[in-house]
């Protein structure tokens, strides 16, 4: 049976305390995140002053009230979550060391923290870029091309120089015909029409130019051209061999 407490007539009933809401946050001087902006700024200044005197608990509350803003700024600059967390940690280590140098008359606590964070983030970007440039330069200096690559390059350069010198020794008309046919994509007939000379003249000039190039590039000057090409000698007629000492065969229609 529930007991009841009797009170004199006319006496007001005592006030019943309101039930606490689960998860409700009670604002304390050490947690300046709630309240008007002026109260938050004043709370941060108080935490900074206590941090400057070496109060680790005040530093923990200062970190909890400003860490999100510092990390967001650093992440916008670096765009790398891992590096952003590392730089943000460096910022708060700097705050712990340099808290005695903070002067409230020069600005509020949060802008001062964000200035430190921005400087450290920019320094990290510059450091990463410099490291990448050094690694790239070291890789270029350490690269040694294969001997075959160097030899091919040198050989190709020498061969091109020889061809240029050989072309320079041709006459103007020979060089013009040769360049049109072998480098300009023209046929001999098209080259003759473009230059305005007979087709036979173009063939003769090309034949003389090729002979000169062969001699200049190391081939024997008298090397015969392949049968069927302009200026090539005709193939010898086929003859039947006979045993040594045998009499020649009689001509057709002659008497024995």
Image: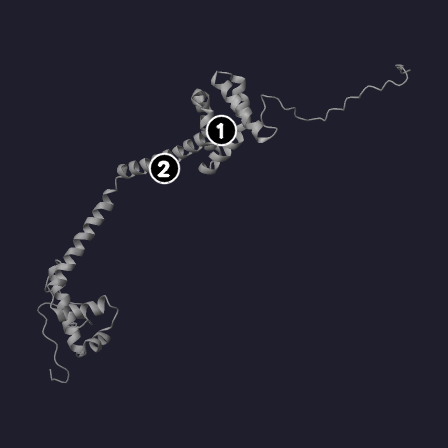
Quarter holding residue 237: bottom left
Q: Nearer the viewer, mark 1 or mark 2?
A: 1
Q: Residue at x 22, y 45 (%)?
A: 150
Q: Residue at x 52, y 32 (%)?
A: 69
Quarter holding residue 198: bottom left
Observer-nearest of 64 and 109: 109
Give the vertical position of 25 relative to 4 (above or below): below
Observer-nearest of 139 and 190: 139
Labels 1 and 2: the sequence-earlier one: 1
Q: Residue at x 57, y 31 (%)?
A: 37
Helix, strand or loop under label 1: loop
Helix, strand or loop under label 2: helix
Observer-nearest of 226 and 242: 226
**What number is the disc on residue 177?**
none
Give the vertical position of 223 relative to 109 (above or below): below
Q: Residue at x 44, y 28 (%)?
A: 106
**Residue 95 percent coordinates (x, y):** 46, 24
Classify the position of the C terminus by image quarter. Answer: bottom left
The answer to whether residue 24 is left or right of residue 70 is right
Asked if one can make out residue 232 in the rendered structure from this viewpoint, the answer is no
**What number is the disc on residue 129?**
2
Q: Report if the CB atoms under discs 1 and 2 are less than 8 Å apart.
A: no
**Residue 161 percent coordinates (x, y):** 15, 55
**Residue 58 percent coordinates (x, y):** 53, 19
The answer to whether residue 116 is left or right of residue 255 is right
**Residue 143 percent coordinates (x, y):** 27, 39
Measure how far apart labels 1 and 2 are at the Cα level.
33 Å
Observer-nearest of 79 and 253: 79
Q: Residue furthest front?
A: 10
Asked if one can make out residue 189 in the rendered structure from this viewpoint, the answer is yes
Classify the position of the N terminus by image quarter. Answer: top right
**What number is the disc on residue 108?**
1
């Amino acid at each position: 049976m529930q007991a009841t407490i009797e009170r004199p007539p006319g006496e007001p009933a005592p006030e019943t305390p309101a039930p606490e809401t689960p998860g409700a946050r009670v604002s304390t001087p050490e947690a300046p995140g709630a309240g008007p902006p002026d109260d938050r700024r004043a709370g941060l200044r108080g935490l900074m002053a206590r941090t400057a005197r070496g109060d680790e608990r005040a530093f923990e509350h200062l970190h909890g009230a400003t860490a999100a803003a510092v990390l967001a700024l650093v992440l916008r600059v670096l765009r790398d979550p891992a590096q952003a967390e590392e730089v943000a940690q460096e910022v708060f280590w700097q705050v712990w060391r340099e808290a005695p140098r903070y002067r409230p008359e020069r600005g509020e606590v949060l802008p001062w923290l964000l200035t430190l964070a921005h400087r450290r983030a920019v320094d990290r970007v510059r450091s990463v870029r410099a490291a990448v440039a050094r690694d790239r330069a070291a890789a270029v200096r350490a690269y040694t091309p294969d001997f075959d690559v160097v030899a091919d390059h040198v050989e190709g350069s020498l061969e091109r120089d020889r061809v240029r010198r050989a072309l320079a020794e041709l006459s103007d008309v020979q060089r013009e015909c040769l360049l049109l046919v072998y480098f300009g994509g023209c046929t001999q007939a098209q080259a003759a029409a473009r230059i305005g000379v007979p087709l036979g003249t173009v063939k003769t000039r090309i034949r003389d130019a090729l002979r000169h190039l062969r001699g200049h590039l190391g081939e024997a000057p008298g090397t015969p051209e392949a049968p069927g090409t302009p200026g090539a000698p005709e193939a010898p007629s086929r003859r039947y061999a006979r045993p040594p000492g045998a009499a020649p065969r009689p001509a057709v229609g002659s008497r024995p």
